[in-house]
Amino acid sequence: MTNEKGKILLSDDEEEMRMLTSFTLQENFPQFEVESFEDGASLENRLNGYTHDVRLVITDNDMPRLTGSEIIDRYATRLRFKNIPFILCYGGEDQIGEKAVKNGAFAYIKKPFNPEDYVGIVRKALKL
């Protein structure tokens, strides 16, 4: 058996937000490794590969090439991902997040968010 850390996949096209949330995740969940992606297509490539180590997917919605909502629509309800929660992060109308949950997301987080609320939702998703 390997000592490989479980992975949290994080995708956001805004570098500053990606760095901030990655840091927040690393500080609060050191038992996991954070892999970050700058667009939905890069995240999709990862999801189409090896995913046995993935414990959580957090995706921004408004990204070039593929939105977070499209990622959730395509992957969250697939049998292969049944034990991997998906969280949509976005700025905008409530309906976006509500639709994501209907389409299989574990939860949604509206931007701007309180870091403690963000950590709390991630903790629930990871069952910690």
Image (spheres, rainbow, N blue to C red):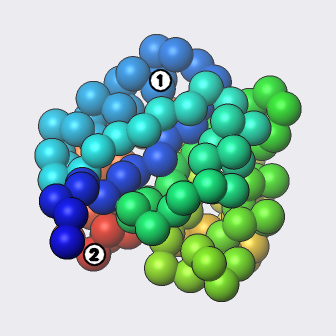
Give neighbour class at mark 2: few <14, some 14-19, many 20+ (Cα, 10 Å).
Answer: few
Is residue 27 positioned above or below 125 on the image?
A: above
Q: Position of residue 120 (x, y in %)?
A: 28, 58
Label 2 sits on residue: 127
Badge number at residue 47: none
Extreme residue toward the right, this view: 65
Q: Position of residue 90 (x, y in %)?
A: 62, 41
Q: Viewer-proximal residue, 6 or 58?
A: 6
Q: Amino acid at mark 1?
A: Met
Asked where in the image residue 97 lies, by quadrant, the reply is bottom right
Extreme residue toward the front, this view: 1
Q: Earlier in the sequence, mark 1 or mark 2?
A: 1
Q: Position of residue 2 (x, y in %)?
A: 21, 63
Q: Position of residue 75 (x, y in %)?
A: 71, 66
Q: Which residue corresponds to the image point at 62% horizontal and 78% vertical from the top-left?
A: 80
Extreme residue toward the top, this view: 16
Q: In this rendering, does residue 101 appear at all?
A: no
Q: Viewer-proximal residue, 48 or 84?
A: 48
Question: Which image quadrant: the N terminus?
Answer: bottom left
Q: Which residue corresponds to the image point at 39% horizontal and 21% vertical from the top-left?
A: 19
Is residue 27 positioned above or below 103 on the image?
A: above
Q: Amino acid at mark 2?
A: Lys
The answer to whether 114 appears left or right of 128 in the picture is right
Q: Which secondary structure lies at badge 2?
A: loop
The answer to whether 128 appears left or right of 106 in the picture is left
Q: Which residue corresponds to the image point at 16% horizontal and 59% vertical from the top-left?
A: 3
Is residue 17 positioned above or below 93 on the image?
A: above
Badge number at residue 17: 1
